[in-house]
Amino acid sequence: MPEQIPPYSAQACPRCHQSFACKATHIGTCQCMAISLSKEQSAFINQQYATCLCISCLHDLRQEYVQQELISIK
């Protein structure tokens, strides 16, 4: 019988340390699918964190990237 993969794993966000459900094995239902990130924003986040983040931190980091871009334009 094939091994059953759990639908999600509870993880602590490496940024805020809050618990969240990572659904990487069922990515279509994962919380991270609710946010749209550009390639540049994804790269910015991946430079800082190697693992999944909670949706709140993804939103915060996307905003941080946008603000840094605005500052660099001035």
Image (cartoon, rainbow, N blue to C red):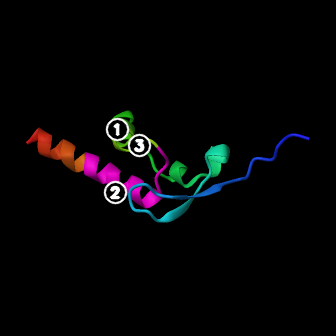
Q: CA distance from mark 1 to mark 3?
A: 14 Å
Q: Which residue is mark 3?
A: 37
Q: Residues within 10 Å of mark 3 (few under 14, many from 20)?
A: some
Residue at the extreme right of the image, as rendered: 1
Up the image or down, 23 lies above or below 44; here it is: below
Return the x and y of residue 8 as percentages of the image width and height.
66, 54
- Identified by mark 3, the residue type is Leu
Identity of the residue drawn at 39% across and 62% down: 16
37 left or right of 71 in image: right
What mark, if any, has residue 47 been given in the picture?
1
Question: Which segment is the magenta one?
Answer: 51-65
13 left or right of 44 in image: right
- Quarter of the figure with the C terminus: top left
What mark, if any, has residue 22 been given in the picture?
none
Q: Which residue is mark 2?
A: 60
Identity of the residue drawn at 46% across and 52% down: 53
* Sequence order check, earlier mark of 1 and 3: 3
The residue lying toward the viewer, choosing from 34 and 42, is 42
- Identified by mark 2, the residue type is Asp
Residue 58: in magenta span: yes
Q: Main secondary structure of the magenta part?
A: helix
At mark 1, the secondary structure is helix
Q: CA distance from mark 1 to mark 2?
A: 15 Å
Query: How many tags in the picture?
Result: 3
Residue 37: in magenta span: no
Return the x and y of residue 57 as percentages of the image width and height.
39, 57
Image quadrant where residue 2 sits: top right
